[in-house]
Image: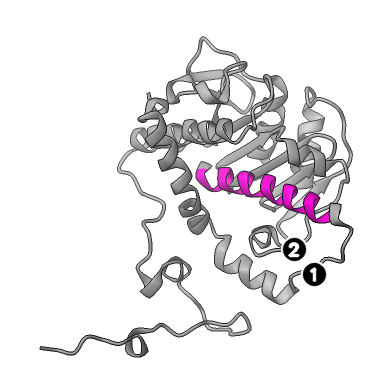
Amino acid sequence: MAPIPTPETTAQPILKSNETKDVDVMAAMAHNGKALPGIPTFNSFIEKRQWQLEHMAGAFRVFARDGFAEGISGHISVRDPEFQDRFWINPLAVHFGMVKASDMICVNLDGEVVGGNTAGSINAAGFQIHSSIHRSRSDVHAICHTHSVHGRAWSAFARPLEMINQDVCYFYKAHSVYSDYGGIANEASEGQRIAQSLGDGKAVILMNHGLLTVGQTVDEAAFLFCLMERSCKVQLLAERTGLEKRIVSDEEAAYNYKMASTPETLFVEFQPHYQYEEYLSKGDFKK
C-alpha cells in the first residue's frame, strides 16, 4: 500500500506578491488547485439569454435582501447575447424583491422596446445611464446602479475609496468619481458624462447620487456592487474613529487586484449569494 502523502509532500508553493510567476487565477482560488466551475458556455443564444435573465433576477433578490431598494430608483441591465445593440433592464416600480426573469424588458440603444415584458415601462433616467455606458463600452455586458445607503453617504465626499483592507483592493485603480452632479439623469448628456467618468474602469462613485458597477456578467457587476457598498460602509466607519489609517501598499494592492478581480473570479464570488437566494425563494425569481 502506498504511503499516505504528508502535508510536506502535497503542499503547494506559496506565491508571494513580489513574485513575477504567472498564476492560474481560477486554480489559485481553491486548495490544491481544485477550482470551482467558472462562467458557463451555451449552445444557443436562447439558452444564454434565459440564463442571463435568471441571474439578473437573482441579483435583484440579493439587492433587496441587502436593503438596496429605494422607491423606483435603481436598475440592472444586461446586454443581449445575440443583438449587441439591445439590452435587458428591469421594469419601473417593481420592488427588487419581487422581480422575476419574465418581468425584464428588452430595449435597443434608441430606447425602443423590442422584446420581453412589452406591457411594462422602464426608468427614463436608468435608460440614459445604461444606454450611454453600453454604447461606449463594448466589453461591458452588465451594469448595476442603486441608491444604496452607504454608497450615497460616501458619495457626498466625492472621494475614491482608499485601499484600507484586502477586499477593497478589488477596485485598485479601477474606480473613479463623477463629481459633476447634474440632477436626475433624464437627459442623455448626464448619462454620457457618467459613462465618460467611468472610463475603462469597473466602478464609479456618483457624487450625491450613489454607486455604479459594471462587468462581463451580471454576477460580476452585482458582486462588485455589493462589495463597493460594504467598502463604503467600512471607509465611513474607519473615518469616524479619527485614527490614522494604514493603507495597503501599491504593490500588495496590485497583487490583490490581479488575483481576485478578474471576470471569472468575480463571477464565482457571487455564486454563494445567488445560490442562497435560490434556496430561500425556491427559485421563484427564475419564472
202 on left or right of 3: right
Q: Nearer the viewer, residue 214 or 57?
A: 57
Marks 1 and 2: CB-CB under 8 Å?
yes
Mark carried by residue 89: none
Q: Where is residue 78 in the image (x, y as percent from the top left)?
A: 54, 35
Element class at badge 2: loop
Mark carried by residue 246: 1
For label 2, the residue is 164
Q: Position of residue 204 (x, y in %)?
A: 74, 46
Residue extent of the magenta highlight? 219-239
- Amino acid type at image mark 2: Ile
Q: Which of 120 and 252 is in front in this view?
A: 252
227 on left or right of 80: right
Q: Nearer the viewer, residue 44 or 33?
A: 33
Q: Nearer the viewer, residue 158 or 199?
A: 158
Q: How crowded is mark 1: few (under 14 residues within 10 Å), some or many (20 or more)?
A: few
Q: Residues within 10 Å of mark 2 (few under 14, many from 20)?
A: some
11 on left or right of 258: left
Residue 15 higher or lower than 24, as above or below: below
